[in-house]
Amino acid sequence: ETGVTQTPRHLVMGMTNKKSLKCEQHLGHNAMYWYKQSAKKPLELMFVYSLEERVENNSVPSRFSPECPNSSHLFLHLHTLQPEDSALYLCASSQGISDPGAFFGPGTRLTVL
Amino acid sequence: GQQVMQIPQYQHVQEGEDFTTYCNSSTTLSNIQWYKQRPGGHPVFLIQLVKSGEVKKQKRLTFQFGEAKKNSSLHITATQTTDVGTYFCAGRPSGAGSYQLTFGKGTKLSVIP
């Protein structure tokens, strides 16, 4: 058990849908992250939050909108996605943004039709 | 931007043989991390290397950080079927205020019993 949970585990959505991914960490960490894992591409860092403030946004399209209401929860709001956005979306947390060892959640497998 | 190259992409070994994966960064790193992802699973943090020339061991796994802090390797002695998975390196660039962690594409290890 990693201490980082993600829901849903699988999601199929149309291009006009709006959905949200949820991440919760039970480790008392102060930093949380969203990553995208596509086939044949390296893991891509999307967003970084430290103490509920966004500190990094890696040129992610606006159709992805993160939200961090507190240090234990992280959301990724999705709207008008494209088929190429289909991927595994991984949430991770660490003690601090410069601390080693991100703890990853199991991921949400997203398919955009 | 920073690039992290990892080779080989795939490696098939007979159980009991050794395995090595190599990681090279286009820029100097402040540290490098290694992760393992089992099939169908999520990345799990293995170790972080910080010092130039650093060598760390975890049972049958040996991790090295190059003198120039631009390359790293992971060596597994006498592989077992439990070693199956994809091994990723992730480098954090030198420089203040950088939270970026750039991942390599990973080396997928198959172990033939």
Image (tube, rainbow, N blue to C red):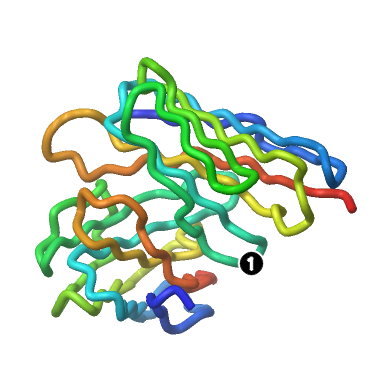
Give the quarter of the figure containing the C terminus of chain A: bottom right
Q: State the residue lying farthest toward the bottom.
A: A8
Image x and y of residue A29, in percent: 23, 69
Question: Residue at the spot x=50%, y=64% of the render?
Answer: A88
Q: State the residue lying farthest toward the right.
A: B113
Q: As rendered, which of A10 and A69 lies closer to the eye?
A: A69
Image x and y of residue A59, in percent: 25, 47
Tell me: A10 left or right of B68.
right
What amino acid does circle 1 point to?
Answer: Gly
Question: Residue at the spot x=25%, y=57% of the render?
Answer: A47
Taking B92 as reference, is B15 above or below it? below
| The image quarter in which residue B101 lies | top left
Q: As rendered, which of A80 and B60 lies closer to the eye?
A: B60
> From this viewpoint, is residue A63 visible?
no
| The image quarter in which residue B97 lies | top left
Q: State the residue lying farthest toward the top.
A: B68
Tell me: A86 left or right of B91.
right
Image x and y of residue A16, in percent: 39, 76
Question: For the residue carrying disc 1, how many other residues have a C-alpha within 10 Å: few (<14), some (14-19), or many (20+)?
Answer: few
Tell me: B17 left or right of A97.
right
> From this viewpoint, is residue A36 visible?
yes
Question: Residue at the spot x=41%, y=79% of the render?
Answer: A6
Q: Secondary structure at mark 1?
A: loop
Q: As rendered, which of B89 and A37 lies closer to the eye?
A: B89
Question: Residue at the spot x=56%, y=53% of the render?
Answer: B36
Q: Which residue is mark 1?
A: B40
**Dot 1: chain letter:** B
| The image quarter in which residue A34 lies | bottom left
Instruction: Count how many numbered circles sit on residues in the image.
Output: 1
Image x and y of residue B46, in percent: 48, 51
